[in-house]
Image (tube, rainbow, N blue to C red):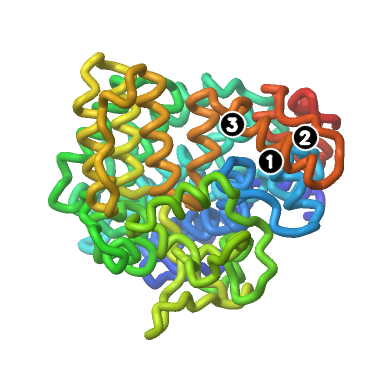
Amino acid sequence: MKKLLYYIAALGLITSAGCKKFLNQEPISDLGPESFWKSADDAKSGVAAIYDGVQKTLNGNYTDWGDARSDNFTYGGTGENQINVTLNGLNSLNGAANWSNLYFTIGRANLAIKYIPEIALTSSFTQIVRNNYLAQAYAIRAYMYFYAIRLWGGVPVRLEPYESLTEDPLAPRSGADSILNNIIIPDLVKAYSLVDKTNVTVWEMNAGAILALQTDVYMWKLDYAKALESSQNLINLSFKYDVSASNSTDWKKIFLDPANTKEAIWSLYWDSHDGGNGISKIGSGSNTSNYYIDSTVFMRYESNKNDIRRAVTYDTALVTAGTRIIQIGKFYPLNSSNKVLYPTNALNSALLPLYRMADVLLLRAEALNKTSANKAPVFTIVNRIRTLRGLTPLVPADYPTDRDVETAVLNERQLELFAEGKRWFDLVRTGRVLETMDPLIRNRQKLLGISQTGFNDPRKILWPISRQALNRNTLLRQNEPYSE
């Protein structure tokens, strides 16, 4: 049994799960297929385990993977991890370099994809219900692999659950492009063909979420035509999804009540009973946040005080001359005095936005800029969002080149999606990591009194593979220039 567990850990594929609720159903525990995957309740529990895996995967990594290495944040103290992340001093021992939970989630999705089709249909477990469960499994598997290729490049691939000692648990890395073209995109196409189009539950990988993820994937692939197609398909669901918030209260609903706003597409419900989530790194009931808002983006907010997002994004009550903001309030409620009610780390519940309409529309604007000399549709999208959020429209003549227009879109994405795990991937996708981060990191190093090496090695855009993964899988080779 110990040997079996070792091999399971080698690929990070297990059938056990925690206690995150999905449709009020407890996810599976240590049950094998011979005693599980027999009924509709088993299918429900199996899918619950997948969402539990998403939660575990993004615990802490929501910020570390998507924001902490970008110009959104700088280090908030003297902790070694936060300094290493914000100075791009990554190594194989960094906690966020560990992909185990990501593969746990893929393993659970593989189990659902294999066994749900074998469960007999009933009057309540119809073909539509079964297909909708399968759609979520396929889409979340794609979501996990999409994270993987953006973070590490090529990674090991497994599309079947590991269930026997006779199977070889080790696998070499497959190329990122191969995974994108042969796994992620086909999984999403399959998911959209199966998903119940009438299901708009914000806590589930619904049809809108699949289209949003497709748009994101095609933008990463630089397939702008496909990104425009998938984003248009989402726009066509305007009965459910749109941008509309024109005051702080309505915008705050994206983060506090996503089920009742057309702005939200897919949100992750994080119950504090499952442990504090990674957002505690950027806002909690104490002054121990790992990351501060970087001064550049902070000054952009402060120069536009009519922006309804400013007072919601961070605690403006803490703003004084020279203050570095450490409290990100957008994920938490306000009291009767309009003050942020920060939780303690141990009670840090949050409703984390994974995809929302403004995100997809701004990706669409970026794609439109890449595909047409006519920039009017780009500014129609950007200025619609800016106007709703309380800002003056941009003047197209002020942005004469394609790159200038792209900068305008990215600037709006930074303000709109701050701390939502998007900025780092925006910089990588558009090839702006080195030019953006090198001067910032040099200045941070100067402030710390250490050698000013900056960020000038494009190989370090990828994360290192964790030492744990390298030790367990002898077929892996470390990303250069990181050491084993």
Residue shown at the point (78%, 46%) measured from the top left:
447
Please report whichever mark, 1 or 2, sits nearer to the chain's N-terminal start: 1
Please report whichever mark, 1 or 3, sits nearer to the chain's N-terminal start: 1
Estimate the spatial distance between the alpha carbons at disc 1 and disc 3, rounded to whole Å: 35 Å
Question: Which kind of residue does numbered mark 3 sit on?
Answer: Thr
Q: Is residue 135 left or right of residue 70?
A: left
Q: Is residue 394 left or right of residue 155?
A: left
Secondary structure type for disc 2 = loop
Residue shown at the point (31%, 26%) measured from the top left:
398
Residue where numbered disc 2 is placed: 473
> Does the CB distance between marks 1 and 3 fall below 8 Å?
no
Are there few (<14), some (14-19), or many (20+) residues within 10 Å of tag 2?
some
Q: Is residue 451 above or below residue 80?
A: above
In the rendered image, residue 265, in percent from the top left (x then y), is placed at: 31, 52
323 vs 441, nearest the viewer: 323
Residue farthest to the front?
Answer: 321
In the rendered image, residue 61, in percent from the top left (x then y), is placed at: 61, 51
Secondary structure type for disc 1 = helix
Residue shown at the point (63%, 56%) measured from the top left:
292
Any part of residue 144 in sight: yes
Displayed quadrant of residue 53:
bottom right
Please report whichever mark, 2 or 3, sits nearer to the chain's N-terminal start: 3
Total numbered badges shown on the rendered structure: 3
Any part of residue 104 in sight: no
Displayed quadrant of residue 138:
top left
